Image: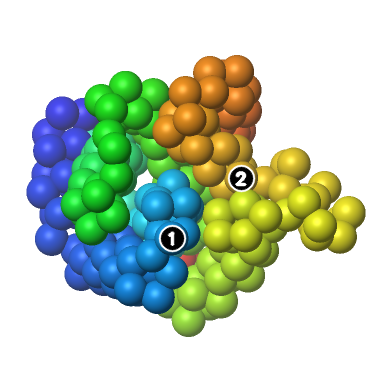
Amino acid sequence: MKTVFVLNLKSSIKDMYLLFWSILMPFAAIIALRIFLPSYAGDYVEGIIAVSVFFYSFMTTAFIALSQRKRGVYNLLHATPMPLWKYIISISSSWAIVAIILSYIVLLFAIVINQLNFSFKILLYMTPIILIASLSFVFFSFFISSLVKNEGHLSMTANVLMIPMLLCSNAFFTLEKAPNLIQYISIVNPFEWFLNGIKSAFLNNFSIWGESLLLLLGCLAMTLIISLKTFKYSDQ
């Protein structure tokens, strides 16, 4: 497991999707908010971090999983003694570590650009939330990548799922006056749980933090089971 973890970690860091969607885009958003909405720029840091992690741990990893399956990488598992669950947890853990590093990079950039006050307690409470949420999204990305045949189908499927999850959350606007249906969706929205966990870490709201952590742990268990049950070694 250690070897798979290290090798996958090294290859993940070089991924161009990661560079664009999870680093350059958040940086551009932070700079744009600082220029055009300077009085509100600091209020969107948690949302930008959550979106950056979400894009990487769901969208980017889904494309990587599909690519590896099409290249026959997963067929090689039949020739090794490593159980499927160990392989999935190994590579998912490496992707989760990358997601945590991404969140630190985006947070540091936001602190510098917006001149925000910072406490290391934020990292202490933010890190487990990001770890559990990113693992959940990665496990779910295995499920989505198993449903499609090519990158075009994956892009459409991922967007159909991601856009409602983003819109039915408080990432960039409040849902207080949203229709009841949208508010109900936000209650069962894993991305909203993730976002609330990050916001509560910034606000030292430990009751909401604990609630978000428990919900994400339940999501983690469910997505792990789904990813194992639906895993496809090849397209055949």
Say if 99 sits above or below 56 in the image.
Answer: above
Q: Is residue 73 visible?
A: no
Residue at 56% in and 37% down: 196
Please identify the quadrant where the N terminus is shown: top left
Q: Is residue 113 visible?
A: yes
Most foreground residue, 231 or 22:
22
Q: CA distance from mark 1 to mark 2?
A: 24 Å
What is the x, y in percent for residue 228? 50, 38
Q: Nearer the viewer, mark 1 or mark 2?
A: 1
- Image quadrant assignment for residue 147: bottom right
The residue singled out by tag 1 in the image is 39
- How crowded pointer 1 is (Cα within 10 Å; few <14, some 14-19, many 20+) is rated as few
Q: Amino acid at mark 2?
A: Glu
Q: Earlier in the sequence, mark 1 or mark 2?
A: 1
Badge number at residue 192: 2
Most foreground residue, 182 or 159:
182
Image mark count: 2
- Image quadrant assignment for residue 11: bottom left
Residue at 25% in and 25% down: 120
What is the x, y in percent for residue 227? 52, 42
- How crowded pointer 2 is (Cα within 10 Å; few <14, some 14-19, many 20+) is rated as many
